[in-house]
Image: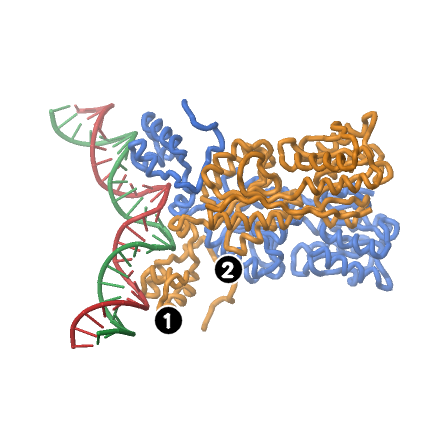
Chain colours: A orange, B blue, C green, D red
Amino acid sequence: MIESAPGLGRAGFSVSMATIYDVARRAKVSTYTVSAVLNQSAKVSPQLTARVLKAARDLNYTINHIARSLQTRRTMTIGMLIPDIANPWLGLVVRGVEDVCSKRGYSLFLGNTYGDISKQSDYLRVFRSRQVDGVILFMAANSERELAPLLEAKTPLVFAGRRPRRLDADSVTADNHLGTKLAVNHLISHGRRRIAILVGESTLSTSRDRVAGWRASHRTAGLSIDSSLVSYGEWTTASACTRTLEIMRRRHPPDAIFASSFPLLIGVLDALRQLGLRHPQDIEVMSSDDSRLLDVFEPRISVVEQPSYELGAEAARLLLERIEQPSLPSRQIVLKPALKLRD
Amino acid sequence: MIESAPGLGRAGFSVSMATIYDVARRAKVSTYTVSAVLNQSAKVSPQLTARVLKAARDLNYTINHIARSLQTRRTMTIGMLIPDIANPWLGLVVRGVEDVCSKRGYSLFLGNTYGDISKQSDYLRVFRSRQVDGVILFMAANSERELAPLLEAKTPLVFAGRRPRRLDADSVTADNHLGTKLAVNHLISHGRRRIAILVGESTLSTSRDRVAGWRASHRTAGLSIDSSLVSYGEWTTASACTRTLEIMRRRHPPDAIFASSFPLLIGVLDALRQLGLRHPQDIEVMSSDDSRLLDVFEPRISVVEQPSYELGAEAARLLLERIEQPSLPSRQIVLKPALKLRD
DNA sequence: GGCTCTGATCTAATCGATTAGGGAAAATCT
DNA sequence: AGATTTTCCCTAATCGATTAGATCAGAGCC
């Protein structure tokens, strides 16, 4: 076999690509036969098979996925929306999604909503017009109303990370209630009694579940609940910093803080640094999300380890199953977090 | 105007979507007219315009991008390949790309190569079959040979972060030579004399440029160059840790280490922790990439701040220009890094 | 009025695949 | 051998847009 270039990477698009007609003509067969050979969708004699394969190779033929999609009404693409890909924990989630998708032949459209409802709607519209086969959504706060029609239309859609309160839909989330309970229990066992908790917007399931876990933990331990120690707000480092400063300057500041995500943790530590407070002597800090980082830096922060990669991978698996069997009853998968102590 | 559902988010795909034919029939016009109205590609009388718009609204019509793409031979999609989306600094780069793309109506396919050449080739093939309009590539080490055919075929392609050595192509990179020189100069000004440098595979431009900067800095300061202090290897935390352990156990260990990326830095710090060495007393560490993290954690590491977001945004802009004007001469954009001191 | 010109709209081909329906040759059965 | 079934492959319609070329009504002109 004489080949002009080494095996892989011969690809070259944009310059008049060969079509199935070109291959058919060169192999002196019909397009049906070419399609049958390349997709192995029907039996074709060895002679023709060989001719087709040779012609395809000679022409450096690659299927045009756009044309196929138009005909089959399946694009083998899925769309994923997240608040911000620069958030490392979301990066891990996306990696989980992407690994599963690519393994099954799907390509991934990625969009950042920055938590903005109208951006989220815009992207969903784009995904619709691009005929994606399904969507994985890390939903923006307060966007339940906008999403209801999607679900009614039976769009394959999986909620990742955050689940809608009222809607009956597929979702994959971490057990934030449990995770927070574990963390708060641990702080209580260290003798902490005034434990503040920083979460995101109060409409997010993640915020609600975590606060519920915090409450449960207090109840079980027989501690009184001081609601002023619960801080809802934006999911940002800046907001966490501001909120921590405010809380720590009160007359009765807390003796521990649970920051329910990595960006919030940074804000908390920034504030404590500004106030000259040290962990764990002056105040004990715990967080959600994990990161190799925390292993090598000071202060040593114990965390509730989120199953980020698994969350993404599981969401993708769920979505692909939903795409294949649209009438399946909806499933809510809840992954268990684990406590990672660094005392 | 009577509407059954509130403005946004009425989208609903998967259940038999209306086509341009449906709209045409309902408005009692031809598909030509519908197309002309919706794309504003030709003048249409006010009456027909109104009828078309109403029909489109009534049917909740959304264009089928797949069908349009087949006809126009432009998909308004671009593909991006990076080693690993879980790397926060790459997350920022992707954010830059995605912002620019979405603003201009392009959607983004994302793929992780994990630095694997064959994965990279596979993805490029997929991108080709999906008819992406262009590609942004954070190339895998040693993959120049595979990429040459792409460039010959005039595929719109922009190299981001790393540039190929021999190929004449569009690229956006940071000035790693300069960045490293600044860092090493700074270490030298602190009296450090044996400065180790950890980089990635020796075939990557980023590695070569950084080592060149390190050499230049030594030359300018009149210091002798000890090549055993240059460590090439995998771009991973684990590899950096192993390599640091090896280097520090030598008879003449260095008194400073420059880790040329965040993941490498983590490996270095991990190794130093294992060896019980402290920064900056025992050894001074600097790094590339920045992160809010470094502001709030100990030890306080000074870094060469990479223009990550800008790098992505600039790569996207370059690519879109290239798509619009394929015959433009190739351009290599080099962004300046800045020293961020935390002594 | 008849002719030309302009501008709005329509008809129908096209992009590149898939695939139902059909036909001819080969294989099997009587 | 003739009838029937099976196998393999082809023809042509189709997916849902865009758009060149055709059509046709009305405006402008002599």
Please state which amino acid type lies under the numbered disc 2. Pro
Q: Residue at x 85, y 49 (%)?
A: B280
Report the front residue among A25 and B306. Answer: A25
Q: Marks 2/1: CA distance? A: 31 Å
Between residue B239 and residue D12, name the one nearer to us: D12
Assign a secondary structure to mark 2: helix
Q: Quadrant of the N terminus of chain A?
A: bottom left
Q: Is residue A60 above or below residue A88?
A: below
Q: Disc 2 vs disc 1: which is toward the camera?
A: 1
Mark 1 falls on what kind of element? helix
**Residue B169, numbered label:** none
- What amino acid type should be assigned to the residue bearing mark 1? Pro
Figure quadrant of residue B199: bottom right
Nearer to us in this view, A335 or A196: A335
The disc numbered 2 marks a residue on which chain? B
Q: Position of residue B57 (x, y in %)?
A: 40, 30
Q: How many other residues sit within 10 Å of disc 2, few (<14), some (14-19) or many (≥20)?
A: some
Give x and y (percent) for residue B61: 40, 35
- Residue at label 2? B149
Q: Is residue B39 left or right of residue A167?
A: left
| Quarter of the rendering containing residue A119 | top right
Residue A46: give its label: 1
Q: Are marks 2 and 1 on the same chain?
A: no
Contact, CB < 8 Å: mark 2 with mark 1? no
Chain identifier of the residue bearing label 1 in the image: A
Residue B94: x %, y % from top left: 60, 45
Tell me which residue sits at (56%, 55%) in the image.
B168
- Where residue B232 appears, as percent x and y from the top left, is 72, 60
Q: Is residue A62 left or right of residue A169?
A: left
Query: Is A44 placed above or below A231 here?
Result: below
